[in-house]
Image: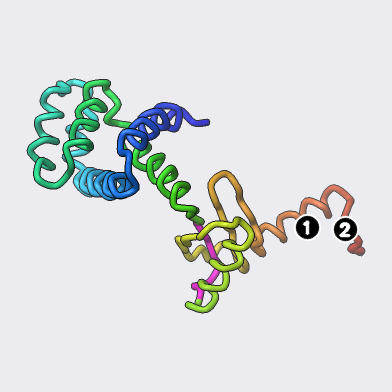
Amino acid sequence: MMMGERVARPYARALFELAGTDEVKGQVHDELGQITEVVLHHPGLKSFLWHPQVSSQAKAELLGRLFQDRISDLVMHFMWVVVSKGRETSLESIASEYRVLWDKHQGRIRADVRTAMALTERDHEELSQVLSRATGKTVDLSVTVAPELIGGLVVRMGDRVLDGSLARKISVLGQRLRNGSGGGYVVEH
């Protein structure tokens, strides 16, 4: 487990439990998304919040002014706790961990897919269905085109990685050939 996850998980779990109902849990999910979006897209804000010489009071006041009419009291108080504990640099990780808890609660899982070529709508739907059957959950795909894969795709779902790329197959074949276990291939000199 990475350091960011170690810090973020307890905060995300605590907030998830405090949220109580499904409706509030979903609202908190959306509000954390709004906050991280604003922070990520405003480098000056991120620099201010992450600066070690800016007081937690100043950070909390700024967040209060920015979000007072946009987020619930629960999330606002949570943000103040995060800032007062000096964990504002973990905000993105906390939001990410919360999203994992929310998805799990909803019976959903996210899959990051890298493909050599863009997927058609039909390919996208078929891949989503195959992964849903394999996991028993609704799978939301995030697809990125990565030409360096040459062909095929790589799927990452949580800690699992399925690499069906042509680049990987070529790499494995090359290793087998170098190690003398060509997997049944005959190589002539």
Please state the total of marks drawn on the protein image.
2
Q: CA distance from mark 1 to mark 2?
A: 8 Å
* Residue 33 position (above or below residue 91): below
Q: Which residue is mark 2?
A: 183
Q: Are marks 1 and 2 in contact (CB under 8 Å)?
A: yes
In the rendered structure, the answer to whether residue 104 lies left or right of residue 155 reads: left
Q: Which label belongs to residue 173?
A: 1
| Colour treatment of the image | rainbow
Neighbor class of circle 1 (other Cα within 10 Å; few <14, some 14-19, many 20+) is some
Amino acid type at image mark 1: Leu
Q: Residue 49: percent from the left, percent from the top?
A: 20, 32
148 is within the stretch colored magenta: no
Q: Residue at x 11, y 26 (%)?
A: 58
Name the one closer to the observer, 40 or 34: 34
From the viewer's perspective, tell me whether residue 174 is left or right of residue 158: right
The residue range painted magenta reads 112-119
Is 65 placed left or right of 18 in the picture? left
In magenta stretch: residue 118: yes
- Residue at image location 51% in from the left, 63% down from the top: 146
The residue under the point 54% across, 57% down is: 137
Secondary structure at badge 1 equals helix
* Image quarter (top left, top right, bottom left or bottom right) of the C terminus: bottom right
- Give whichever of discs 1 and 2 has the lower sequence position: 1
Amino acid type, mark 2: Gly
Question: Dot 2, crowdedness within 10 Å: few (<14), some or many (≥20)?
Answer: few
Give x and y (percent) for residue 71: 17, 44
As drawn, 16 above or below 162:
above
